[in-house]
Image: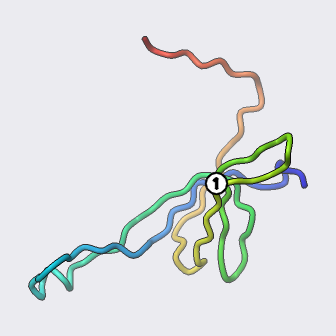
């Protein structure tokens, strides 16, 4: 498997969100909203049923970690992220 064959993405989807606990009035319950969520990683599955994003990649062992499967109908945006090819040195503020 070649990890370079997969896109690095930021995926945005809608998810369930509990907004009322205990007794709530009708207006509060009917105005409940969905949660807008985001995930960053490699897009390893993208079909009519679902998308699967993998967050971590162990290059030496060729193993993935921390993946999430999301129903395709929940996805509202997929943004492909660029990869910096040249060497990069971090500068940390003290």
**x and y, in percent, of residue 33 in the image:** 29, 74
Snapshot quadrant of residue 86: top right
Residue 68 located left or right of residue 15: right
Look at the image and name its color scheme: rainbow
**Label 1's element?**
strand
> Which residue appears at 58% of the width and 78% of the height?
71
**x and y, in percent, of residue 40 in the image:** 59, 52
Residue 90 located left or right of residue 29: right
Crowdedness of circle 1 by 10 Å Cα count: few (<14), some, many (20+)?
Answer: some
Q: Furthest-bottom residue in view?
A: 26
User: Which quarter of the rendered picture does the C terminus lie within?
Assistant: top left
User: Which quarter of the rendered picture does the N terminus lie within?
Assistant: bottom right
* Up-down relation of residue 14 to residue 10 (above or below): below
**x and y, in percent, of residue 67 in the image:** 65, 60
* Up-down relation of residue 50 to residue 63 (above or below): below
> Which residue appears at 60% of the width and 77% of the height?
72
Residue that carries the numbered disc 1 in the rendered image: 9
> Which residue appears at 54% of the width and 65% of the height?
77
Snapshot quadrant of residue 69: bottom right
How many numbered badges does the structure rendering display?
1
> Which residue appears at 80% of the width and 52% of the height?
63
Q: Furthest-right residue in view?
A: 1
């Amino acid at each position: 498997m070649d990890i370079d064959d997969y896109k690095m993405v930021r995926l945005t989807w809608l998810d369930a969100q509990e907004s009322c606990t205990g007794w709530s009035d009708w207006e509060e319950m009917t105005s409940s909203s969905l949660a807008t969520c985001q995930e960053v990683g490699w897009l390893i599955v993208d079909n009519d049923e679902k998308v699967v994003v993998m967050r971590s990649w162990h290059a030496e062992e060729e193993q993935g970690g921390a993946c999430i499967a999301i129903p395709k109908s929940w996805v509202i945006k997929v943004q492909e992220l660029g990869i910096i090819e040249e060497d990069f040195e971090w500068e940390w503020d003290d």
